[in-house]
Image (spheres, rainbow, N blue to C red):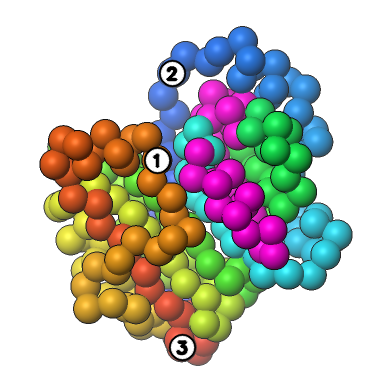
């Protein structure tokens, strides 16, 4: 058993905390009628991603797609890539399904399940060219920080599903969390920072309404983009 496996066995990582939230009638209808068409049901069998999309082209994963605004914008702008979004909250899943249907996107699918279990049981190793995590919950209270998604063992787990040369891109507007994420990713042996500290926002990550409100309030948005450059480090 590897060190990462021991950590995961000792302390199960969860990529979310479920909260009750309002769901609109449109989101509920979309969830009931469209998930079968655009969703991928959770399974303990490894997926063949080329069969899912019926084509061979670069594959990207987004963890925590929220209401799907950025997810859809990226998939629409980059038809040469395929995207899988993972989201647990039904209103967000419904919202994303509506957008997929409206735009007729053939390169975007969604899985409604815990991201850690999806990675461990459904996805093949070294299958993604990039992994996006945009504005994960910062859990600002000190007593809640153990619930944060970005922790050392989670980043180590993600690296197993990146191709050599692939990247992990995290964006946050929470300064303290950004510093912690930077520290965690700097300590991952198979990753190298593509910037000195924080990266410039790449064109593919469009500004969301949430982000625009934050900028108006004086929040600084920080992007962290790290590239996998050591294949052997993920195997120890």
Report the disc number at residue 95: none
Residue in the foreground of this view, choosing between 196 and 232: 196
Contact? badges 3 and 1 (CB < 8 Å): no
Residue 71 visible from this viewpoint: yes
Q: Quadrant of residue 126?
A: bottom right
Residue at point 37%, 69% (across, down): 225
N-term-proximal mark, 2 vs 3: 2
Q: Quadrant of residue 47?
A: bottom right
N-term-proximal mark, 3 vs 1: 1
Q: Which residue is mark 3?
A: 230
In magenta, the rendered stretch is 69-97
Report the disc number at residue 208: 1
194 on left or right of 161: left
Total marks drawn? 3
Q: Position of residue 167 (x, y in %)?
A: 47, 72
Q: Is residue 123 above or below residue 143?
A: below
Q: Which residue is mark 2?
A: 20
């Amino acid at each position: 058993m590897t060190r990462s496996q021991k950590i995961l066995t000792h302390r199960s990582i969860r990529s979310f905390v479920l909260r009750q939230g309002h769901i609109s009638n449109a989101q509920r209808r979309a969830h009931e009628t469209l998930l079968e068409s655009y969703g991928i049901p959770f399974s303990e069998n490894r997926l063949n991603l080329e069969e899912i999309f019926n084509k061979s082209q670069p594959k990207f994963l987004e963890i925590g797609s929220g209401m799907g605004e950025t997810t859809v914008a990226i998939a629409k702008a980059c038809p040469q890539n395929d995207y899988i979004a993972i989201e647990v909250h039904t209103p967000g899943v419904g919202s994303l399904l509506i957008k997929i249907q409206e735009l007729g996107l053939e390169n975007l699918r969604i899985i409604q399940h815990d991201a850690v279990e999806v990675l461990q049981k459904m996805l093949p190793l070294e299958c993604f060219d990039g992994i996006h995590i945009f504005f994960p919950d910062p859990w600002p209270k000190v007593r809640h920080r153990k619930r944060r998604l970005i922790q050392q063992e989670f980043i180590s787990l993600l690296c197993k599903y990146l191709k050599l040369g692939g990247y992990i891109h995290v964006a946050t507007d929470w300064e303290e969390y950004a510093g912690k994420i930077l520290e965690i990713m700097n300590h991952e042996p198979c990753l190298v920072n593509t910037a000195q500290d924080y990266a410039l926002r790449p064109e593919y990550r469009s500004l969301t309404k949430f982000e625009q409100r934050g900028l108006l309030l004086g929040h600084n948005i920080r992007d962290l983009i790290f590239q996998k450059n050591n294949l052997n480090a993920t195997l120890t």
